[in-house]
Image (tube, helix red, strand yellow):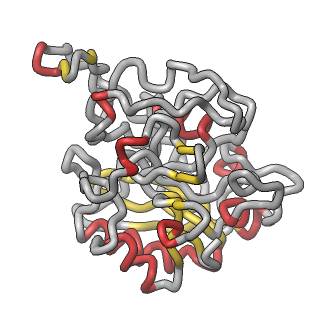
Amino acid sequence: MISRTSRCAVALAVAALLAGCGADSAPEVEEARRVVTKPQDIADGTLLAPATGLGSRPPVWLGTRELPRASTGYGEVRPTPPALRNRRWTMPDTVAMLPGRGFAAKVVSPAPGRVIARSSWQEGCPVAAADLAWLRVTFWGFDAQRHTGELLVHRTVADDLVSVFRTLYRQRFPQEQVVVVRSYNPEAPPTGDGNGTGAFVCRPSTGASYFSQHAYGLAIDVNTFQNPYLKGEVVLPELASAYLRREAVRPGMVVEAGPVIEAFARIGWEWGGDWNQSKDYQHFSQNGR
C-alpha cells in the first residue's frame, strides 16, 4: 500500500511540480487559480477548499486531523466523515498536461534522476534506480475532465501498464490523482484520509518485514480511499470504513464486474481483493502478492 504520509502530503498539493515532455526538458509550472467559496460549496456542514488548477474542492481539513495511535500501531479506525462517504473530487495535476484530446502516455526509461530524487527511492531499495521507468498517462478525474498523472514503475511492465490506463481512460474510470509517492515514514502522524493512485514506494509489505511489491515497481494501488485495505482490526486509510461496504458501489471503486480488474487481468496481474487473510481492494501486482 502507499504510505499514509505520502498520500496525505500529495493530497494537499496545490501547485504543479517540475515536469517536461522529454527525458529532461525545461520545467513547466501550472499556477493555481482562486475561486470564491459560495454557499452551495458547503456539504454536510463541511466548508470546502477553493478550487485550484484543474482540481475540484476537497474539505479544507483534509490531511490535517491527526488520529491517535491504536494498539495495531496504525491510526485509530473511526467512522467515515460525511464529506468522505461519497468521495469524488480531483486534485490538481502535478505534471504538465500531455498533448492531445484523448488518451496519451509517455514512458521515459530509465527514469530521469530528477524524478528519482523526488521519490522514495534510496540506496538499499530492492530495485536499481536504472530499472525504474517514469510513466505519464492521462486519466479521467471525478470532475469529468482529462488529467495527466505520473508513476514510477519497473521498466519491464511500463508498456503493459500503459495498456491498463488506456482501458481505464476509455471506460472513464475516475481517479482522484495519479502520483509518484514522495516518501515513506511509518512514524508520521496518521490522518486516515489520504487517497490516490501510485506504484513505486520503497517500503515493507503492510504488517511485515519483507519488501512490498511496490518496492520493486511491480504493484499499483488504485484510489486508495475508495478501495481500502482490511485485515482484522486494521483499516487503511483509517477513515475509509464506509467503503468496506462493497455492495454500495460509488464512483472510483474497484468492483468485480468493473473495468479495473479486467484491465489488470489482461496483463496477468492479480487483485488484492481476492486475498483470503486480508482484503486489499486497491492493490494489483504482477505476482499476486
Q: Which quarter of the picture shows residue 208?
A: bottom right
Looking at this rendering, what residue extends furthest in the right direction? 124
Residue 119 x/y as whole percent: 67, 47
Please state the horizontal and vertical placement of residue 141, each as a whole percent of the image. 28, 49
Q: Is residue 287 above or below residue 20?
A: below
Quarter of the figure with the C terminus: bottom right
Q: Residue furthest front?
A: 232
The one nearer the camera, 18 or 81, is 81
What residue is shown at x 51% (from left), y 47% (from top)?
19
As displayed, is residue 91 above or below residue 189? Answer: below
Residue 161 at x, y percent in the picture? 49, 73
**Is residue 197 or residue 279 the one in the foreground?**
279
Total numbered badges shown on the rendered structure: 0
Q: Where does the image place residue 263, in percent across and percent down from the top left?
A: 38, 77
In the rendered view, would you say 25 is above or below 275? above
Q: Nearer the viewer, residue 126 or 109?
A: 126
Q: Is residue 149 left or right of residue 156?
A: left
Q: Is residue 151 left or right of residue 59?
A: right
Q: Quick check: 68 left or right of 90?
A: right
* Quadrant assignment, res 137: bottom left
Q: Measuring 68% from the left and 41% from the top, which residue is drawn there?
A: 183
Front-most of residues 199 and 249 = 249
Residue at position x 54%, y 39% from top? 7
Residue under the image location 30 percent in, 37 percent down: 85
* Above-or-below relation of 171 to 228: below
